[in-house]
Image (cartoon, rainbow, N blue to C red):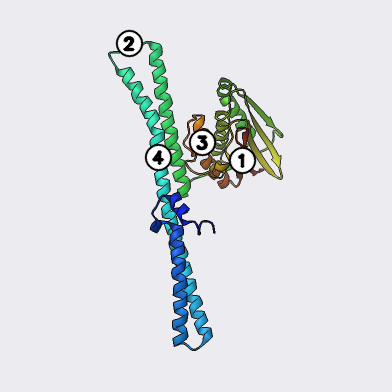
Amino acid sequence: MFRIINPIASCKKYGVSMWQCPQFLFIVMGLVIIVAIMSTYFLAALRIGNPAVVSLLVLGVGALLLIMNFIITNSFERMAEVSKLKSEFIHIVSHQLRAPLTNIRFSLDFLTSAKMTQTKEQQEEYFDILKENSARMSDLIDNLLTVAKIESGSFPLSKSKISLESIAQKLIQKFKSFALASNIKLLFFSADHSLQIVGDSLWIEQVMENLLDNAIKYTRGGGEVIVKIYQKKGKVFFEVRDNGVGVPKKDQKFVFQKFFRSDNGFKKQTGGTGLGLHIAKKIIEKTGGEINFSSKENQGSTFWFSLPKA
């Protein structure tokens, strides 16, 4: 109801004119339907003497117009959403590609310059920059392709019994040096070493890696990240808790949306496309599970997902 009586806010949300705004068109067409129903009633009453036939005719016309209203409004809403996502996509991609491309160009200029004296250490440093920024661009493209596959329905998921603990142990080892360099304590607890779920090990690992990576990136030096695996009501839970910057309350409803990054993410100057959590949510849901979080700004966040026990 709030959206219907606030078409201006809806137009601003989608960035379209009033006559392209779904909520404004819904109101206009609603008024048209009312006028059409009243006109039908009076015309039918004048030409048809049977009240029952008049009522059925009015109900039929009203139902047909309501269906048409819903279809047209829904179509405009989808078009507006696509237009909005297209603008966000261009903004995010251009922003995410600009920095690594600039770094690559600068590094190549340095390495190919004959006027500058280059030591072996300097050359290795700039080759590392090239490697790192190439990887960033590759990750962005991979995430965009994954989102495209999910939305097109061509997202294959194999299913087999897997141990979340074995994946978690591998990821703990992978992120140990990252956490140590950031002065963050990384802890792991598993309530039952035999817990298994049914899913695609590669994609489930990507979800776990994304949650753990985010927790470390958004935790200040001296903090801690706690990883837990436990069973509850026939489901296996994977939980990552941190005492980092947290997610502002006003941003929490957008966390799993495409391209979204909270203000805290920009303040901490962490890289990211805003696609990781969106992809994670889709993977867990397609595997038959649930993913959610709780967070308090400047106190930390707890992200978790649950899947049926194998």
Q: Earlier in the sequence, mark 1 or mark 4?
A: 4
**In the rendering, at what x and y percent does residue 66 appear?**
48, 68
The residue tagged with tag 1: helix, strand or loop? Answer: strand
Inspect the image, locate mark 4, and give the three-letter code of the amino acid beneath it: His
Q: Are marks 2 and 1 in contact (CB under 8 Å)?
A: no
Whether residue 158 is visible: no
Residue shown at 42% from the left, 38% from the top: 92
Residues marked 4 and 3 touching at CB (< 8 Å): no
Task: Assign a secondary structure to mark 4.
Answer: helix
Quick one: label 2 or label 1, which is nearer the N terminus? 2
The residues bearing labels 4 and 3 have C-alpha atoms spaced at a distance of 16 Å
Q: Could you tell whether 113 is left or right of 42 in the image?
A: left
Mark drawn on residue 117? 2
Query: Mark 1, residues whose alpha carbon is within 10 Å: few (<14), some, or many (≥20)?
Result: some
The amino acid marked with disc number 2 is: Thr
> Which residue is the site of mark 3?
263
Cα separation, mark 2 vs mark 1, equals 52 Å
In the rendered image, which residue does mark 1 sit on?
293
Q: Earlier in the sequence, mark 4 or mark 2?
A: 4
Gap between marks 3 and 2 measured at Cα: 42 Å
Q: Nearer the viewer, mark 4 or mark 2?
A: 4
Please identify the quadrant where the C terminus is shown: top right
